[in-house]
Amino acid sequence: MPLEIYRRKGGKVWHYRGTVAGRRLRGSTRTEDKARAQRIAAEAEQRAWTRHLDGPGATLRFSDAAIAYRGAGRSDRFLAKVEDHWRDTLVRDITDGAIRTAAMRLYPKATNATRNRQMIAPTQAVINYAAEQGWCSWLKVKRFKVEKKIREPVTLAWIDAFTAEASPKLGALAVFMFATGARLGEALALTWGDVDLSGRSARIRQTKVGAERLAHLQPRLVAALGNIPSNRHPGDRVFGYDDRHNLRKVWNTAVKRAGIKPLTPHCCRHGFATTMLHAGVDVKTVADMGGWADVATLVKNYAHAMTDRTITNVIFGTELTQEPAAKAVND
């Protein structure tokens, strides 16, 4: 039967119910105006017929796809602003060009990398999740061109110099990221309940890939964490920094006092990967230990060639004759 509108007992808002194309429909019009409610019910009925005759993609709205995407437990990183932009736009109307235009409009002063990460990636993720369910077609979006930046890793010598000038908790943060490969957000979210000093382990919640990993705490890292002045309640954050801006100020101050290269906290994660790879640890193990879901990403971004040309001596089992460039602090 066609959709009819009604009010619940004691209520003022109109609802609709009925069967369209064999599907039972119920919903709220979210209005107390009867004429408007009738129009909303008619539109819902029309969408149901369109879906029945032309397939689910004909009426699929981005808002509905995003709700399903979230409900499936997929990453919602940067999704809120994307949802606010697309709202009830039909997925079939969201094209490659429309997404790129939206990225430039929402982030006019941002880098292309930011546009790719915060607009294109989440929009495409929602739509392609819907495609997995058979609700619409798959979508390919051309990314904005991003100039490849050379990421410089910290070294153990850099860490030594930094911790000598940093507070116990700031120094421990640097050592933790260098020793475990943790991302900055993961390190700042670490609580004392995640840390087992006696068992030499820490549970790291990998926000970017939506998983967890158990990291080994080496003796130096155990000592660094143990030196942090804290009551160590399970719910308290280990490093105590809630604001990246405040962290950046004290971090840069310690760097300046130490007289070392102004490397960022993320360079500690880079240093973990580079140091492990140069030590001969296989790529798959490094990816697992550092929380990289994709080995190819690790190789592309972190597996830089060693500058020591005498590295080829290993073919015959002989030692290097040059000082590895990775040991330099101020070069």
Image (spheres, rainbow, N blue to C red):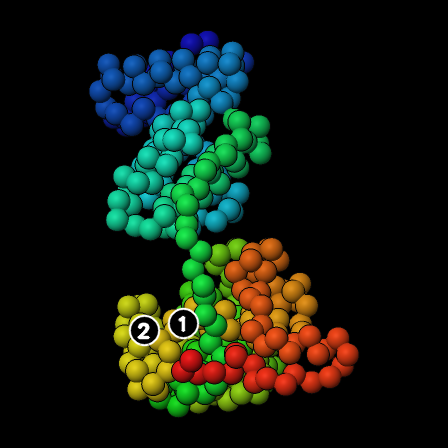
**Mark closest to the chain's N terminus, 2 or 1:** 2
Question: On the image, which quarter does residue 46 sit in?
Answer: top left
Task: Please provide percent x and percent y for residue 53.
Answer: 51, 11
Residue denoted by label 2: 247
172 with respect to 108 (left or right): right
User: Mark 2 touching mark 1, by CB under 8 A?
Assistant: yes
Q: Secondary structure at mark 2?
A: helix
Q: Amino acid at mark 1?
A: Pro
Mark sitting on residue 301: none
Which marked residue is nearer to the observer: mark 2 or mark 1? 1
Residue 210 vertical placement versus 252 (above, below): above
Asked whether residue 254 is in view, the answer is: no
Task: Name the residue: 65% across, 65% down.
Answer: 283
CA gap between label 2 and label 1 equals 9 Å
Task: Name the residue: 42% across, 80% down.
Answer: 331
Q: Nearer the viewer, residue 308 or 293?
A: 308
Task: Name the residue: 76% across, 81% down.
Answer: 317
Question: On the image, which quarter does residue 289 sit in?
Answer: bottom right
Task: Name the residue: 38% across, 31% down.
Answer: 97
Task: Please provide percent x and percent y for residue 306.
Answer: 58, 72
Residue denoted by label 1: 265
Q: Nearer the viewer, residue 259 or 189?
A: 259
Q: Amino acid at mark 2?
A: Leu
